[in-house]
Amino acid sequence: MKSGNFLLAEKSLFKRVEEEKKHRESQEVDIINYQPIYQHIFQSLNEAWISRYFEMEEADHKVLADPQQSIIKNGGYIFVVLYKQEPVGVYALLKMSDPDYDYELVKMAVSSTAQGKNIGFLLGQAAIKKALELGANKLYLESNTMLKPAINLYQKLGFKKVVRNYTPYQRCNIQMELSLKK
């Protein structure tokens, strides 16, 4: 028979049900490489979250208008998340010409209808795996502390806060890195 202290240490029924639901939903997720047919979803998902919290900036317009040119042709990658075969999320690895960082994780967006299904975490893991395959040593990202779920996600993925001087985004108030080589 289990002691009372052991039972208190166990996860709540709600937490276990929630985790099982996320696990089942993640079985319906496919992460695929970007194709030009997904340009509209890449642009619209990012415009939606940026406009919800901030204003679109010149750097946003440039990247979102032509991700093939601004990300892929420069050695980067874009991932598209399909949930039940519908595109619901995007994320990109931007190749950096920086002595400290190999890639920047940029333009992560998940449809509001698909949030809470562990998709952001799966996307982050896929981006990290791809960066490792490419031989990257360090990843970089910029965000805003107002976006608490995003910051929590980045920390869960292993990112740590750093201080750098330059950012092309007025909304950026936190910069983070992830060392891939242990």
Image (cartoon, grey):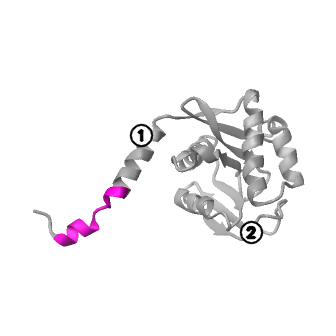
Percent position of residue 113, x then y: 60, 44
- What residue did someone put label 2 on? 173
Left or right of 145? Residue 29 is left
Query: Looking at this view, is 158 or 143 the one in front?
Result: 143
Q: Residues within 10 Å of mark 2 (few under 14, many from 20)?
A: few
For the stretch drawn in magenta, what is the main secondary structure? helix
Q: Quadrant of residue 101?
A: bottom right
Q: Amino acid at mark 2?
A: Asn
Q: Which residues are magenta?
A: 4-14
Q: Nearer the viewer, residue 4 or 112?
A: 112
Q: Residue at x 71, y 61 (%)?
A: 143
Q: Position of residue 47 (x, y in %)?
A: 78, 48
Secondary structure under the numbered disc 2 in the rendered image: loop
Q: Residue at x 73, y 37 (%)?
A: 41
Looking at the image, is mark 2 or mark 1 earlier in the sequence? 1
Residue 149: horizontal and vertical position, in percent?
Answer: 59, 60
Q: Which residue is mark 1?
A: 24
Q: Secondary structure at mark 1?
A: helix
